[in-house]
Image (cartoon, rainbow, N blue to C red):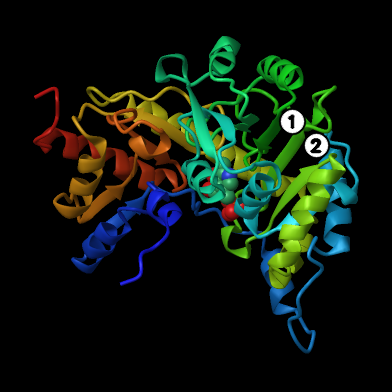
C-alpha cells in the first residue's frame, strides 16, 4: 500500500477531540456526557443573525471575493474602532474561522524549518498548524504556580536562534485563561523589534477579560509591520459553525501574500459572511450578558473545583478555560476512564487531557483543560461527578 506523508504521520491528534469515540460509546450506553472538553458554549446566538439566513433570497449561493465581502470588511473596521483598534478594511482578510487565519499567517511568513516561539501550554492546534507548515514550534514554559503568567523575557531570549521567525501569543489565553497585560506585551514588543520577528496574536476571546481590560497587540507602537492579528466570530457570538474569522495586519506584504493563499481556496463561506455582517449589528447588551454569564460560571466552577481534595486550578482571568491539576498519575487515562468506566446519576464528564497542550509528553500529565461552557446547573453536576470519580479512581495518588 502507498505510504502516507511524513508530515501526516507527524501531525498530532487534537487532545480536544481525540477521546470523542469513547464519548460516543458512553452515549450509546445511555450515559449523558457533559462536554467540558471543547469550547462549544451553550449561550444562544443572537436571533437576528439566525434570521439573516432565513431571509436569504438570492437565486443561488455564489462564491464571494477571496478577501471576503467588502461590506463585511468595512463593518469590521467600525467594530475594531469601538475596541480602540484603528485599521483599514485593506488590512483585513476574511477567513474560514480563526483557524484559517492562523494557517494563512504561517504559510505567509514561515519557511520549512523556521521556528515559532510560543508560551506553553498553548492552544493545541498551533502545534498542528506549525507541523502542517513544516516549521517548528519552540515552547517557553509558563507554570500553574503563577497562574501561567508570561514567562520572563530571558526565557524567550534563551531559545532565539537564526531560524526564529515569530512569537505567537493567545490573549486571553486558551487553554490557561491568562490575560497578558500591556506591560507584558511591551516586553514582547522589545524582543520582536530587536530581533526583527513577526508577532502573531490570537485575540478571539478579546471580549472575555473578567478582571482587567484587554490590550491589543495592534496598539503596540513601533512594530506595526511585524504584527499579525488572528480573530474570529466563533466565540464572541457563539457561532462556531458559521466558520468566519479574520487575518489582520498593517503589513501589506503579509496581506498580499495571504491573499494568494486565500485565492487558492477560492472564498470564505458566503452564508457565514451574511450572518457575520448581521452579528456586527448586535446590541452591546448581548455581549455584556454573555460576559456576566461566563464570569459567574468561572467564579462558581473554579471555587468548587478547588474544594476537591488534591485538585487545583488557578483563577483564569479571561476566555472560558482553565488548566486544572488533578491528583492522578496520568490525566489522559483518567479522562478515558471517565468515559469508559464511570457514571454518576447517569452522567459523566468529558475533559481534554493536559499533555496535548504541551510539546513534551510528560508535561501536563496530571492536568486537564476544562471549558466552563455549560450552564451552572450542569457545571455543578460536572464537579460532583469529578469529585465522586476521584474518590473511586484506582489511579488517585492520594489514596
Ligand atoms: C485560541 C483559539 N484560536 C482559534 C480558534 C479557532 O476558532 P475558529 O476557527 O472557530 O474561529 C479557537 C477555537 O477554539 C481558539 O480557541
The residue at which mark 2 appears reads as 83
Whichever of labels 1 and 2 marks the residue nearer the N terminus, that label is 2
Instruction: Kindly report the distance in space between the C-alpha atoms of the residues bearing marks 1 and 2.
Output: 9 Å
Q: Based on the displayed image, in which of its 4 quarters is residue 319 positioned?
A: top right
Provide residue 361's location: percent of width, then percent of height. Answer: 31, 33
Q: Give the secondary structure at mark 1.
A: loop
Q: Is residue 151 left or right of residue 221?
A: left
Please name the residue shown 45% across and 47% down the image.
Answer: 375
Q: Give the secondary structure at mark 2.
A: loop
Please name the residue shown 38% across and 40% down the image.
Answer: 356
Is residue 234 something that shows in the picture?
no
Disc tally is 2
Q: Is residue 1 left or right of residue 103?
A: left
The residue at which mark 1 appears reads as 216
User: Local crowd at mark 2 within 10 Å, few (<14), some, or many (≥20)?
Assistant: some
Provide residue 374's location: percent of width, then percent of height. Answer: 44, 48
Quadrant where the C terminus sits is top left
User: Local crowd at mark 1 within 10 Å, few (<14), some, or many (≥20)?
Assistant: many
Q: Are marks 1 and 2 in contact (CB under 8 Å)?
A: yes
Provide residue 236's location: percent of width, then percent of height. Answer: 65, 48
Is residue 173 something that shows in the picture?
yes
Looking at mark 2, is its residue's CB closer than 8 Å to ligand 1?
no
Amino acid at each position: 500500500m502507498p505510504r502516507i506523508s511524513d508530515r501526516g504521520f507527524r501531525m498530532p491528534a487534537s487532545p480536544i477531540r481525540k477521546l470523542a469515540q469513547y464519548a460516543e460509546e458512553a452515549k450509546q450506553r445511555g450515559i449523558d456526557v457533559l462536554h467540558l472538553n471543547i469550547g462549544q458554549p451553550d449561550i444562544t446566538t443572537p436571533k437576528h443573525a439566525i434570521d439573516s439566513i432565513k431571509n436569504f433570497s438570492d437565486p443561488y449561493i455564489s462564491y464571494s471575493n477571496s478577501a471576503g465581502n467588502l461590506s463585511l470588511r468595512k463593518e469590521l473596521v467600525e467594530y475594531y474602532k469601538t475596541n480602540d483598534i484603528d485599521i483599514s478594511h485593506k488590512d483585513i482578510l476574511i477567513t474560514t474561522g480563526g483557524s484559517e487565519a492562523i494557517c494563512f499567517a504561517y504559510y505567509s511568513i514561515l519557511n520549512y524549518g523556521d521556528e515559532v516561539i510560543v508560551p506553553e501550554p498553548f492552544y493545541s492546534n498551533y502545534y498542528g498548524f506549525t507541523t502542517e507548515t513544516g516549521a517548528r514550534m519552540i515552547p517557553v514554559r509558563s507554570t500553574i504556580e503563577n497562574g501561567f503568567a508570561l514567562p520572563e523575557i530571558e526565557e524567550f531570549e534563551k531559545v532565539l536562534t537564526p531560524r526564529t521567525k515569530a512569537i505567537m501569543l493567545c490573549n486571553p489565553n486558551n487553554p490557561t485563561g491568562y490575560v497578558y497585560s500591556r506591560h507584558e506585551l511591551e516586553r514582547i514588543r522589545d524582543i520582536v523589534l530587536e530581533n526583527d520577528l513577526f508577532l502573531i496574536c490570537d485575540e478571539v476571546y478579546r471580549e472575555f477579560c473578567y478582571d482587567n481590560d484587554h490590550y491589543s497587540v495592534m496598539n503596540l507602537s513601533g512594530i506595526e509591520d511585524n504584527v499579525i492579528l488572528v480573530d474570529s466570530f466563533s466565540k464572541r457570538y457563539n457561532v462556531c459553525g458559521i466558520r468566519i474569522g479574520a487575518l489582520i495586519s498593517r503589513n501589506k506584504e503579509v496581506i498580499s501574500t495571504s491573499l494568494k493563499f486565500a485565492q487558492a481556496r477560492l472564498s470564505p463561506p458566503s452564508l457565514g459572511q451574511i450572518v457575520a455582517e448581521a452579528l456586527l449589528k448586535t446590541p452591546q447588551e448581548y455581549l455584556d450578558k454573555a460576559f456576566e454569564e461566563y464570569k459567574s460560571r468561572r467564579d462558581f466552577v473554579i471555587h468548587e473545583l478547588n474544594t476537591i481534595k488534591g485538585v487545583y486550578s488557578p483563577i483564569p482571568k479571561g476566555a472560558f478555560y482553565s488548566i486544572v491539576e488533578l491528583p492522578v498519575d496520568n490525566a489522559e487515562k483518567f479522562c478515558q476512564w471517565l468515559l469508559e468506566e464511570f457514571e454518576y446519576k447517569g452522567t459523566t464528564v468529558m475533559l481534554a487531557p493536559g499533555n496535548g497542550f504541551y510539546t513534551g509528553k510528560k508535561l501536563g500529565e496530571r492536568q486537564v483543560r476544562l471549558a466552563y461552557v455549560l450552564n451552572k446547573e450542569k457545571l455543578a453536576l460536572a464537579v460532583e461527578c469529578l469529585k465522586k470519580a476521584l474518590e473511586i479512581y484506582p489511579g488517585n495518588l492520594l489514596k
